[in-house]
Amino acid sequence: MNIKKFLFWLLMAAVGLALLGCNTASWLGGGQISNAQQQAYQAELFRLQNTPQSKPSLNYYQDVKPIVDRKCIVCHACYDAPCQLKLTSLEGIIRGATQAPVYNASRIDAAPTTRLFVDAYTQPEWREKGFFSILEPSDKAPSSVSVMNHMLALGKTREIDATTKVTKSMLTLGSERELSCAAGNDMDEYARENPNGGMPLAVAGLSDREYSVLTQWTMQAANNKNLAPSAARILPEDQIQLDIWESWFNRPGKKQQLLSRYLFEHFILGHLYFQSDAQLKVRLGAKRAEPVAVFFKLIRSTTPPGKPPVDVATVLANEPPPEHFYYRFVPVTQTLVYKDHIPYRLDQKRLAYFESHFLSDDWQVDVLPGYSYQERANPFLTFADIPAKLRYQFLLQDAEYFIRNFIRGPVCHGPIATDVIRDQFWVMFENPAVEQYVNDEAYRRESTPLLGLPGEKDALTELGDQWLKYSRKRNAYAKMRDQHYSRMMPDMAPFELLWDGNKNNKNAFLSVFRHHDNASVVQGFRGNIPRTAWLMDYPLLERSYYELVVGFNVFGNTSHQLQTRLYFDLIRNGGEVNFLRLLPPEARQKEYEHWYQGAAKIKVFGAYFTPDFKHASPISYTTKAPKAEFFTHVFSQFPLLAGAQEFAASGFLQGLPLKLLKPFPEPDAFNTLRQKTAEQLPFIQFLPETTLLSLKNADGSSQVFSILRNRMHSNVAFMLGESLRYQQAQDTVTILPELVGSYPNLMLSVTAKEVTQMLKDIAEVETQKDFDLFIDRYGVRRMQPRLWAELDGYRKHLEQVSPIAAGVMDINRYGYW
């Protein structure tokens, strides 16, 4: 066995032990129910059992949905919704819950998919898949009360109140929580073992009116044999556009068919809309008593336009469909959740762009590609007939959307993936006018066979061979690319190499922030100058998308997930090495060693292609800080697109002729925080990943800020053992005058008059006790009723400043406050 194979299987053994440990999380509860609570709980169940139904009947959309949207889906929205109970739609409520987890990193075989609106439609179909009702009382239950009302009653009678600080001794929260998912006949036992496990879980509860509406409607729904969601009405102007787009996607001809397949695979996560942004803003602000379709999903259907669509429902978007299928649009009927709401505009302007960009070019398709293993594993082969430059330009035009698909996307709990990216890094793109893969046909033909992606073959016995096969191909490609660029572009000026966004496209420069097990992407360079940056070319951008979106199965087994994550480590390394070439030769090796400290030297030796440390840089550097000097040049060259105003206001860039923007209420003080490390400012070490700050002004208006903790690591070359790689003393914070992150871990609320004192108090925090006192004064604790008002404020802010992208924020990761 060679050294690389030995190191691989040594790593796999460590991973296997860690993954087995992933399923040993603590119970939800914390102690036994007290006699007083037990009596109150049973009395409430008896009352519910004997409460007559309200008349007139409650309407789900008018009476119930507003409550569920405000206080329930904040935890029951994503794939990690407890017990797969997704409450974002009536369909999800009717489907119910299951004990089968979506996230199970140690499973040998892939789990059956249970995607709402895809894998089953009717209640009997979901029952066959192991879901049980939360509305109907169980025949075996001691009392004829539904699971939902059991959980609501337990929440109403719990003994923790607004004065309580929630602790781990009371119950386990967040992604550490192991779910019991008790069905009706297990509810009494669940209540005895989990006195604090009622709903809403460990947050300020429902008002008396909300509790009455939910419990009454639950009993009403249980007796309604015809309970069914109302179909979302498609407005006439949308129906016109929908018909146009369905006709366009299903046009005959091999050229159109290949393009439709390519676009379909890039829209599978998108929430698509047919109106202009201005028209959609008006529509989103309209209040309607009935469900109206605003966003749509693109699917492959067995039925043609004009008939109700029936999803082909393959596990992956690039799996073979039936011989005859049609591209169709279906309404997005669930409440929009910020985590997985990724909008994309398909209006007449976009249609004209597709026609002129793709179809006016003189390219032909002689034979349509199929769905073989090789074609699914290598999209560069599959879509080779579509000119590569056209594909790359298409991705660049909305680069934030495509990166958001795999950075934010639908994966709710992804620490194995996010362990291999930095907490903050910047992304740039190569100029399609000079990028070599899309411009040099010989180089493209030679390198394309090396760009395949692992994960299609997921048998555990093939894990090692699959990984070694694809890692070798990747490293062979990296060597080929390095030699080709050195030969063909020896003196290329970096600002000819960088895509300039066509002078006005803000997708040219992006920032990614990792929040432990999830991440966010925003336009512009934000935060401090990061430790690393990525320079993405077309192969790197397309591989990222196909590896983490098209080819990723959240229900996949250990082998599939490990292959995917390990290759993403190579993708990150590739982006970093591309950027490294822009620095002077004498600085590259030192910078690279700084990125890959400690045990990462094993990966540098055994898994990565060795970067070019010798070839001359096209930039003449004059300082001893070439990375900062490079970004100074970027800000000077592209001030508006890169966001130089923020940096000038922050004091990072001295002497640039830029108009200073001062978005912070106390610029100097806030900027001081942004430039300090945890060693200099101990407060940082107590911060969670994502903190939202609401600042109330005297006139009733408010400002919002995101305080993001950037954890420093000796390296991010491994999926596991993150705590061993922390460099906590070097942690920093990024403070942005906007909302960033899908999962707030803490909310702070201050008035304008309190800001100066708050900043003074921050500087005095040195211990956990100090931090707890700080939270007492400025923080929003879980059990405080104002928690809901604060969440409402952030939602309304999103609806005002970014209505098309707005959605409900998830508090599954809210901390023990």
Image (cartoon, rainbow, N blue to C red):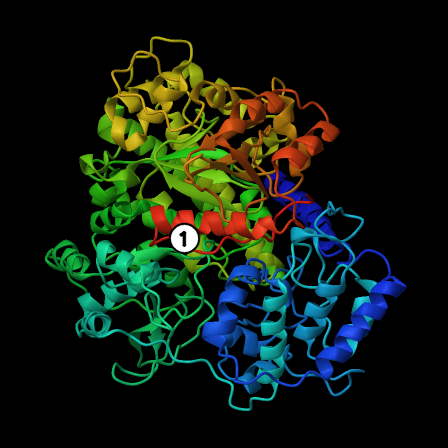
How far across and down, in percent of the image, does residue 707 sit?
A: 51, 34
- For the C terminus, the image quarter is top right
Classify mark 1: helix, strand or loop: helix
How far across and down, in percent of the image, does residue 646 sit?
A: 36, 26
Q: Is residue 542 visible?
A: no
Residue underneath mark 1? 405
Q: In the displayed structure, would residue 305 be above or below residue 115?
A: below
Q: Residues within 10 Å of mark 1 (few under 14, many from 20)?
A: many
- Answer left or right for 248 relative to 117: left
How far across and down, in percent of the image, does residue 644 sit?
A: 32, 25
User: Mark 1 is on which residue type?
Assistant: Asn
- Answer left or right for 101 relative to 187: left
Q: Say which residue appears at 81% left-offset and 82% top-offset.
A: 142
Q: Say which residue appears at 39% left-offset and 65% top-offset.
A: 318
In the depicted view, which residue is nearer to us: 462 or 327?
327
Task: Find the residue positioned furthest to the front.
Answer: 699
How far across and down, in percent of the image, does residue 458 sit?
A: 55, 62
- Answer left or right for 443 relative to 649: left
